[in-house]
Each structure stands twice: as structure tokens, then as C-alpha cells.
């Protein structure tokens, strides 16, 4: 085997320029894929993290039918306290759940005493909410990163439009489930940076205040946001929870609750999927580059060395060894291109991180991109390149091994 | 017992429109350790016959036995294995592997064909390099040596596997007459030392005289056999 490698490498060196060109093409392809995968993957992970950790949680539970009407914030589809307790019990007993936060969502009128506008509000338990969405406090641009009874956090655009700042009194008026109207005065405790996605421009009050505004005798819950211990377990936990909550049925025997992952609820998931599709096609392009370049070189190599093939076949080299000789040439080119590509790719990613690329996403400004490469990609991309390089060498190698020595020796 | 026995050998080629009768009913025997030449003009069937003996091609009809094996029924893979074990080849164009040095060219069949142990390999190559007078050129590449030197290396490569038979198709065609004599002389010397049978084809009348048994081919037929020290017609 060592000798097959020796001959293959010397044959590659024999056509230096061609080998260099092909290996460079593979290298450029590998670099491009790694940098793209790294940056797009990091962008995706970062935005996903922003959405789940500052707002949505990893998954949410609602009363059946709530999500279909979520734009109306229907109070009649809230969970009663008993139903919420069932959910809380299920979540507490699930080993994958780190924490969860009940929310009471409602729409209302927001007044600064001179102007009035509409607002979507979330009644939250601050302690549970800050644990479930740990980046939530970082969205508070002005004011204090807490929320006490009688205080309200309002979105930046609303604060700007209504000329309201922390410490100002405001009034929230809401229609209750029975159709009556109630109002309550709040003190603005902070201004919230807008976030992309549903709920990104909502205001927040304490859940007890929300229940008070809505004149609820017992606090109801519109949704329960859940944070998992391990985000990578999301799909499995959603599946598991769906199975569990399906067992909770109403008097009509219909399921009482529904479970949605952030992917079902955030439009960013479609962008994430698009990034995945683009990554897939970029990989396909790399495979095409490797196939075409290696196959081209190997076909030329076989054609140029027909007499040599005839000679080694005549002196008794078995067809399998002749085949191996050419496959190893393709393999070596793939290995060299892939290794150099990985090294340059890592270097470029390091430079990208050193420079520090920042970008805006929706209302979120100056997000700093930290490009990362997973071990999987670092291994997968070169392995694919090498496998494809070997596959691309197969046809020319088989052709070489099937040559009749007598005809090959006659070749001019 | 004869090393090669040919009985009523025919070889036909089908070209686009016509059938070419390259060999027509050849019968001959070649003894071990003999130094044989097939001579004749271009198109007389010399190369075709050497290809048949070398298991690079199969006769259309007839029986050809080489080193005790009926070679016609051998498969492609079996033929390759048979060649690797029993035969050595010397080509008109030397056919060195350009990316290997002189030493490595000789080493090639020992590694790739016969899988010989490194120590024995080294011993055999050094012995061959000395025998063909190329020991001082061992690290040179084929493009760095002359045609005559290349043919010496080719002889060493053909003999290093200890074959029973070496086939040389026009081995001196690309050499000047002085070098041609040297090469044929070397082949003869190797035959004397190792007892290997040498068969070569040529149309060079001066070189022919160096052979001990001469078969004359005309239009695919055996036109005569000449043995040094006597003559016999086929």
C-alpha cells in the first residue's frame, strides 16, 4: 500500500501545475463551504438564541385553539388556574424542563394622560419569566431590570411615540372577559428594546396586576413558556409533552392543551430553514466541484499514461492494483485539498471573529457575530470531499484496470 | 521437456472489412535456457507470436503451452498472475515508469507483482544492477539516462523476478548498432548466468546472428528454422 501511495504521489507531482490547480479548486470549495456554514450557522444559532432566550422560551403550551386565535389574544381561551396547575405538574415532573413561566396576555389601551394608543401586554411572574427568558433583562434599555407590582415595561417604539420615560405614570385600560372595561395606573419601570418575532413589541406587567385589570377572581394563564435544560433535546421533549398533554381531555373528550416549539411560533424559523437549504445547496456545489475537477484530471491522467498502464499490466500487475493506483491519486488530491481547505477555513473564521462582524436584525442593532464551526462540520466537510474524490476517480480507475495490455502498449 | 510448445497455432484479426490471418498454422518447440530469435519483415507476425507466448493475447485456434501451462484458457486475471510469476518483458521503447528511479523501476515487479520481502528484494536488485552495469545510476530517473542504459534497466527489471522466460520485442530497434550489440550481449550473458530462456524478435539482420536458434516468419508462416552450427527447415 505504501508503494501505491508513493507512485500515486509522484504521479501527482509529475503534473505539478494540474495537480496544484485541482487541489486549489477543492481547497477554495472547502474554504467557501466551511466559512459559509460557520457564519450562517452562527447567525442562525444567534438569532434563535435571541428569540428563545429573550422572549419566547424554547416551547410554549396553550389551551387548545389559543394559537389559532393568538392575534386576538382571546381571554376566553385562557387556562383556568386548575388547568394551569395540571400543566405545571407535568412540567415539574419532566426531567428535561429547566424552568417555565406562566403568562397572561391581553390587549388594551395605553394612555399617557394626553394621548392614547393600543398595546399588547403580557402579565408575567418576573422571577419565573427572567429564568425562562434569561436575555429578557438585557432587552431593558432604560430603567431598572426588574418588574414589581404596579410597574410596567413598555416597548421602545411605544415609549418614543408616546414620549414616555421610566418613572412616568401611565394608564392601561382593558376589556374584561365579561365585556366590562377596567383601568389601572402603572409606573413605567423600563423601556424594552424591540425584538423580532411575535411578542417582540409587547409590554409587560406583573401577572397579578394583569389579573386585577381583567378583574379575574383567580389568575388565568394564556400561555406557559418553557425553557429546557438542553436545547438540542427540543424535538424529543415537544414530542414527549404532546403525548402527555394529549391525555388531558375536556368534558367532550377533546384534548385541552396544545404544545408548540419556538419553530412553530416564530417566522424566523422559515429563514432558518432557508439558511439550511442554502447550506445544503452550497454543499452540493462543493461535491460537484470535486467530482468535475477530480474526474477531469483522472480521465486525463489515464489517457496520458495508457502505455504505462500497458507496461505495468504486461509485467503482471493485477487489475485491482492498477485500479487502486488511480483511486489513490484521486484520494490524495482530495485529502490535500480538504486539509488545506480546513486550515484556511479555520484561519478565515478566526480572522472574522478577530475583526468582529456586527449586524442588525430587525430592530436589534449591532449584534456581534461569533462564527463557530462544529466538530461535525469540521469532520463532515473534508470526509465528504475525500469520499467524493475517491468516487470521482472510480470510473477512470476502472477504465485503466480494464485496459487490454496489448492495446495499451500499441497506443501512441 | 520443451519450455514452449506450439501446435497448429492460428491467429486471425477481424478489421472493419477483412479478416487478417496474422499467424497460420505454426508448430514449434523451444527448449529451456535457449536464446531464440524470430525474424522476418514487418507484418510477418513476429509481434503477434510474442504476444501469444507472453499471454497478452490468445490464439484463434491451436494449442500453446508455456512452462507447462496451456495458456489459451487463462482468464485475464490468471494471465496477469501467470505473466508476473513466469515471464519477463523487454520492450522496444524501454517502457520505464518515468516517476520511479532506476532502482525503483527494477523493484516495481518485486513489490507490485510478486510481493517479495524487503531484504530479499534489496539483495536481488543490487545483484541485477551489478549484472547489467547500472549500479552507479541507481538513483537516476529514466529521463536522466541514455536509451542503451534504459534497455539495461529493462533487462534487469525483466530478470529480477526470476522468470523462466524473457520476451523481447525488437529490443534493439531504438538503439544504435554498437549499443544494440551490447544489449544483446548482455541478454546472452544473463541467459548463461541464470539459465533463463530469451526469445526476441528482430528484423535487424546483424543482430539476428547473435541468436542460437532463429525462426524465420513470412506472412504468418514459419519459413525456416536455423540452429547455430546447423540449419533445419520447418
Image: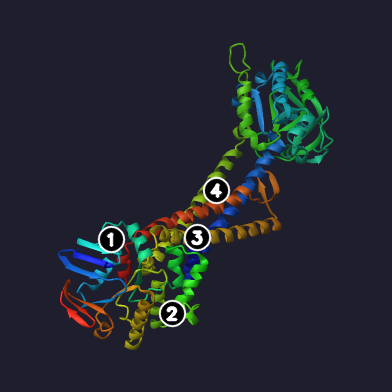
Which x, y percent locates residue B148?
38, 83
Residue B22 lies left or right of residue A140; in this view the side is: left
Q: Quadrant of residue A304?
A: bottom left
At 60% from the left and 57% from the top, the residue drawn is A342
Farthest front residue in view: B1
**CB contact under 8 Å: marks 1 and 4:** no
Q: What is the C-alpha distance between the residues marked 4 and 2?
A: 63 Å
In the rendered structure, the residue with mark 1 lies on which chain?
A: B
Q: CA distance from mark 2 to mark 1?
A: 31 Å
- Give the residue number, with chain letter if any, for mark 2: B131
Same chain for the residues at labels 4 and 3, yes or no? yes
Q: What crowding class fits label 3: few (fewer than 14 Cα within 10 Å), some (14-19), or many (20 or more)?
A: few
At which x and y percent is residue A166?
Answer: 82, 37
**Location of the C terminus of chain B (image quadrant):** bottom left
At label 1, counting other C-alpha atoms closer than 10 Å, the crowd grade (few under 14, some 14-19, many 20 or more) is many
Residue linked to disc 3: A1
Q: Residue at x 36, y 82 (%)?
A: B183
Let me know if residue A118 appears in the view: no
| Marks 1, 4: nearer the viewer | 1
Badge 3 marks a residue whose secondary structure is: loop
Instruction: Report the residue marked by disc 4.
Output: A279
Residue lying furthest top: A251
Q: Which element is circle 1 on? A: loop
- Position of B152 relative to A324 (above/below): below
Marks 1 and 3, how far apart at CA: 30 Å
Task: Identify residue for label 1.
Answer: B71
The CA distance from mark 4 to mark 3 is: 37 Å
Q: Residue furthest bottom?
A: B178
Indicate which disc, 2 or 1, sits on the residue closer to the N terminus. Answer: 1
| Marks 1/4: CA–CA distance | 57 Å
Whether labels 4 and 2 belong to a single chain: the reply is no
- Spatial distance from mark 3 to mark 2, Cα to Cα? 29 Å
Amino acid at each position: 500500500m505504501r508503494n501505491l501511495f508513493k507512485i500515486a504521489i509522484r504521479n501527482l507531482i509529475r503534473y505539478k501545475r494540474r495537480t496544484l490547480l485541482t487541489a486549489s479548486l477543492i481547497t477554495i470549495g472547502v474554504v467557501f463551504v466551511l466559512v459559509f456554514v460557520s457564519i450562517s450557522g452562527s447567525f442562525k444559532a444567534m438569532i434563535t438564541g435571541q428569540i428563545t432566550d429573550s422572549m419566547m422560551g424554547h416551547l410554549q403550551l396553550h389551551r387548545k385553539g389559543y394559537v389559532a386565535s393568538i392575534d386576538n389574544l382571546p381571554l376566553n381561551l385562557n387556562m383556568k388556574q386548575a388547568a394551569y396547575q395540571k400543566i405545571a405538574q407535568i412540567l415539574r415532573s419532566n426531567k428535561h424542563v429547566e424552568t417555565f413561566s406562566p403568562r397572561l396576555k391581553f390587549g388594551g389601551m395605553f394612555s399617557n394622560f394626553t394621548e392614547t394608543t393600543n398595546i399588547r401586554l403580557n402579565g408575567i411572574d418576573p422571577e419565573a419569566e427572567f429564568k425562562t427568558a434569561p436575555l429578557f433583562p438585557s432587552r431593558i434599555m432604560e430603567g431598572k431590570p426588574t418588574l414589581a407590582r404596579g410597574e410596567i415595561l413598555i416597548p421602545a417604539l411605544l415609549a418614543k411615540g408616546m414620549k414616555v420615560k421610566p418613572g412616568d405614570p401611565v394608564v392601561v385600560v382593558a376589556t374584561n372577559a365579561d365585556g366590562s372595561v377596567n383601568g389601572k395606573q402603572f409606573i413605567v419601570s423600563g423601556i424594552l428594546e424591540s425584538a423580532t418575532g411575535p411578542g417582540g413589541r409587547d409590554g409587560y406587567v406583573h401577572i397579578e396586576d394583569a389579573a386585577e385589570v381583567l378583574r379575574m377572581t383567580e389568575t388565568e394563564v394564556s400561555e406557559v413558556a418553557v425553557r429546557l435544560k438542553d436545547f438540542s433535546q427540543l424535538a424529543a421533549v415537544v414530542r414527549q409533552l404532546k403525548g402527555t398533554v394529549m391525555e388531558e381531555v375536556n368534558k367532550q373528550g377533546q384534548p385541552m392543551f396544545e404544545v408548540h416549539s419556538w419553530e412553530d411560533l416564530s417566522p424566523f424559523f422559515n429563514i432558518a430553514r432557508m439558511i439550511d437549504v442554502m447550506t445544503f445547496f452550497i454543499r452540493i456545489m462543493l461535491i460537484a466541484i470535486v467530482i468535475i475537477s477530480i474526474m477531469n484530471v483522472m480521465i486525463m491522467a489515464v489517457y496520458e499514461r495508457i502505455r504505462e498502464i500497458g507496461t505495468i499490466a504486461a509485467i503482471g500487475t493485477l487489475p485491482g492494483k492498477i485500479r487502486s493506483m488511480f483511486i489513490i491519486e484521486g484520494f490524495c488530491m482530495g485529502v490535500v485539498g480538504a486539509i488545506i481547505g480546513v486550515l484556511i477555513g479555520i484561519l478565515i473564521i478566526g480572522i472574522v471573529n478577530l475583526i468582529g462582524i456586527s449586524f442588525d436584525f430587525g430592530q436589534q442593532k449591532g449584534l456581534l457575530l461569533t462564527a463557530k464551526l462544529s466538530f461535525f462540520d469540521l469532520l463532515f466537510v473534508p470526509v465528504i470531499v475525500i469520499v467524493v474524490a475517491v468516487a470521482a476517480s472510480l470510473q477512470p480507475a476502472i477504465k485503466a484496470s480494464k485496459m487490454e495490455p496489448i492495446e495499451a502498449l500499441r497506443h501512441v | 521437456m520443451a519450455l514452449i510448445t506450439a501446435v497448429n497455432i492460428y491467429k486471425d484479426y477481424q478489421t472493419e472489412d477483412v479478416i487478417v490471418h496474422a499467424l497460420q498454422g505454426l508448430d514449434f518447440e523451444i527448449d529451456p535456457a535457449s536464446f531464440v530469435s524470430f525474424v522476418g519483415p514487418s507484418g510477418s507476425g513476429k509481434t503477434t507470436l510474442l504476444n501469444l507466448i507472453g499471454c497478452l493475447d490468445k490464439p484463434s485456434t491451436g494449442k500453446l503451452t508455456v512452462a507447462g501451462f496451456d495458456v489459451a484458457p487463462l482468464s485475464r486475471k490468471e494471465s496477469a498472475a501467470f505473466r508476473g510469476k513466469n515471464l519477463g518483458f523487454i520492450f522496444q521503447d524501454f517502457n520505464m515508469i518515468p516517476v520511479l528511479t532506476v532502482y525503483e523501476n527494477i523493484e516495481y515487479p518485486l513489490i507490485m507483482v510478486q510481493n517479495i520481502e524487503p531484504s530479499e528484494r534489496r539483495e536481488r536488485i543490487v545483484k541485477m544492477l551489478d549484472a547489467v552495469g547500472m549500479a552507479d545510476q541507481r538513483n537516476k530517473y529514466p529521463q536522466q539516462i541514455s536509451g542503451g542504459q534504459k534497455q539495461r534497466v529493462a533487462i534487469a527489471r525483466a530478470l529480477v523476478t526470476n522468470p523462466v522466460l524473457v520476451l523481447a520485442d525488437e529490443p534493439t530497434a531504438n538503439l544504435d548498432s554498437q549499443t544494440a550489440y551490447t544489449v544483446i550481449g548482455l541478454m546472452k550473458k544473463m541467459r548463461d548466468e541464470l539459465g533463463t530462456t530469451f526469445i526476441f524478435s528482430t528484423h535487424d539482420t546483424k543482430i539476428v546472428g547473435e541468436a542460437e536458434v532463429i525462426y524465420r516468419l513470412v506472412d504468418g508462416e514459419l519459413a525456416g528454422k536455423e540452429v547455430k552450427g546447423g540449419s533445419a527447415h520447418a
